[in-house]
Image (cartoon, grey):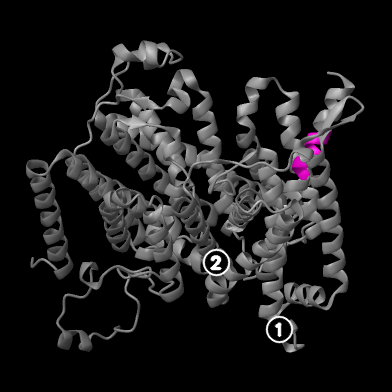
Amino acid sequence: MTAGYVLQQLINGMVLGSLYALIAVGFSMIYGIVRLINFAHGDVMMVGAFSAFAILTVFGLPLWTALLAVLIIGALIAMLIDMAAFRPQRDAPQVNGFITSLGVSILMQNLGILLLSGQPRPFNLPDWMRTNIDVFGARLTVLELTIVILTAVILGGLSLFVQRSRLGMAMRATAENPLAASLMGIRINRAIATAFGVGGALAGVAGIMWAGRAGQIDPLMGFLPGLKAFVAAVIGGVGSLTGAVLGGFILGFAEVLFVGMLPPIYGSYRDAFVFGLLIVILLFLPNGIMGRVSEERA
Amino acid sequence: MKPQRHQIAWAVLAAAAVLLVAFAETFLSGYERTVIGFAGIYAILVVSLSFSNGLTGLFSLGHPAFMMLGGYVAAVLTFPANRKGFMLPALPEWLATAELSLFPATVIGGAAAAFAAVIVGFPVLRLRGHYLAVATLGLIIILRVLINNADGLTRGALGLNGIPRMTSLWWILGWLAVTLLVCWRLKHSSVGRSLLAIRENEMAAACMGVNRAGAKLTAFSVGAFFAGISGALWAHLLTNLTPGSFNLTMAFMLVVMVVIGGSGSLVGAILAAVSITVLREVLRPVEQAVGAYGLVQVIIALLLIATLLLRPQGFFGSSEPRILRPGPVASRTERSELPDQGAPSAARPAEK
């Protein structure tokens, strides 16, 4: 095992971790504010990927318009889901929200199959995204470099937004105590919609990058990344944004190392490994690494 | 002794079911019988899920995993021994020569699923709510990966085909009756009341001396046992088995049926399972004719969301239709003379 090989694995882990982190942050933010595990989050990512496909391939517009568009479309779709499905049952038990999100997820996947067909389509980013950069013997494509840098920029911006902006503060206050926040004049539904919007925008961006890396898209593509983002969020502590980023990277590295360092026959056990890891972590660290101890509400 | 009202109602229902199955077995085509068989198998699955999840408030999505386990165990047991040699070369000697009939294979399949549920339940049942849901969803994925990779034992992703078609509607009806009987008795016993107490308020239940871990494990493994049974029936009805069939969509369908029927309502579970399975099968040719694949799932997902928004407790809540519950035989005037009318009777568990 050469140094170059190890470096290559580290780079792969970094790229995969960035993608997981992007999805997991949105996931965790929504949980933090409404205590809802949103199963449909991965499907917002799928919508992002398909929108990018339409803009790039069907309309032939440049890449930056696609990036801008997925940010907006992701945000709008997520806010629409919140308004139509979750807002009417804010006071229902937690599990109802979860089942609803499961329903929304199945609905979106099958609407996708219905309208776009279940056949995978090739998804190509412009050629220059595929150029290789040589890093001490390891390879990195421009796309992968973009993923890592863009993720860093977005997460930095998000942190500023949540800490400094008025809406960000309203979100944090709502997450802390919705009743007190509403008594202080914070419009709860707007804060929640913001969380969904920001989360959806991140999922949209993750969608276009995931698709660029995979080279193909289909209506079911969001399911597994969405589930794994949940695992990442749990590792970090659901509700904590720093935790979600940390969890995303831990999961990304763990998955790449599992496949890269063990003999190839074990590669097909990757998903079993991820969910085994989830169960073990839930048992020993039920609140995750950055999660607060026992913030359960009756 | 004069039979009570609910006994008569049950007898009528049982007779109707027997007549229906006799009619189906004699007059209907193979395809129609298979559809009815699926409806029955789904009914077993949903009754047991409504018992183990709905009544207890456990939110497990792992039913397809237990079904898969039961199905594979039973299929390997009944598979013709002369074909096992080249199809499943990794089987140990005693398994390779075994060739059981349906009933013992089904029971062993169910027992294997229940055993797995006990092993998995110790760690997993400490989780709650959506954590439990995702961990049990993980069970499906883990088991599927294992089966996919155990080529010599299960034929991996290719799936087992040529399983003898042994499941008749009589077997399904019989097992449905057993499932209903066991779950009904358990629901209306002290076990069932412990489970309901856990669902309503776990802390309070613990304070009243309910053994939470034990009660949850019982519910979980009873559910898994019947899931294993239905997996075995499924395998011998369809005659083939692939790990891909037991997926999130199936877990979702089962949850939809439990929610629509009413969490914890066993009769509601049967009605929801049968009507949704039949709806799916009726709509499927439409879907194919129009070429609108995914339409059925879209309709069912909308049905679920509408139910959750408009009638979150489902059609029956946690209770059973009044006519099927044992109640006072006394006529209205006599009953008003009973002194303890307001007190909850032991035969009628807490209703919400």
* Residue topped by disc 1: A187
Q: Secondary structure at mark 2?
A: helix
- Residue for point 53% across, 45% down: B121
Whether labels 1 and 2 belong to a single chain: the reply is: yes
| In the depicted structure, whether residue A235 falls above or below residue B263 | above
Range of residues picked out in magenta: A10-17
Residue B315 visible in the current orientation: yes
Residue B113 is at least partly visible in this image: no
Q: Let me know if residue A12 is in the magenta part.
A: yes
Q: Is the residue marked by circle 2 packed among few (<14), some (14-19), or many (20+) residues within 10 Å? A: many
* Residue wearing tag 2: A97
Between B241 and B29, the one lying in front of the other is B29
**Outermost residue, front direction?**
A60
| Up-down relation of residue A133 to residue A244 (above or below) | above
Could you tell me which secondary element the residue under label 1 belongs to? Answer: loop
Q: Residue B38, percent across and down? A: 27, 45
Q: Position of residue A117 (x, y in %)?
A: 46, 47
Q: Quadrant of residue B332?
A: bottom left
Q: Amino acid at mark 1?
A: Arg
Residue B264 disc label: none
Left or right: B284 as drawn, with respect to B19:
right
In the rendering, at what x and y percent does residue B67 appear? 40, 40
Query: Disc 1 to disc 2, how far (Cα)?
Result: 21 Å
**Magenta segment, prevailing SS (helix, strand or loop):** helix
In this orientation, which residue lies closer to the viewer: A104 or A71? A71
Residue B210 vs residue B233, the one in the foreground: B233
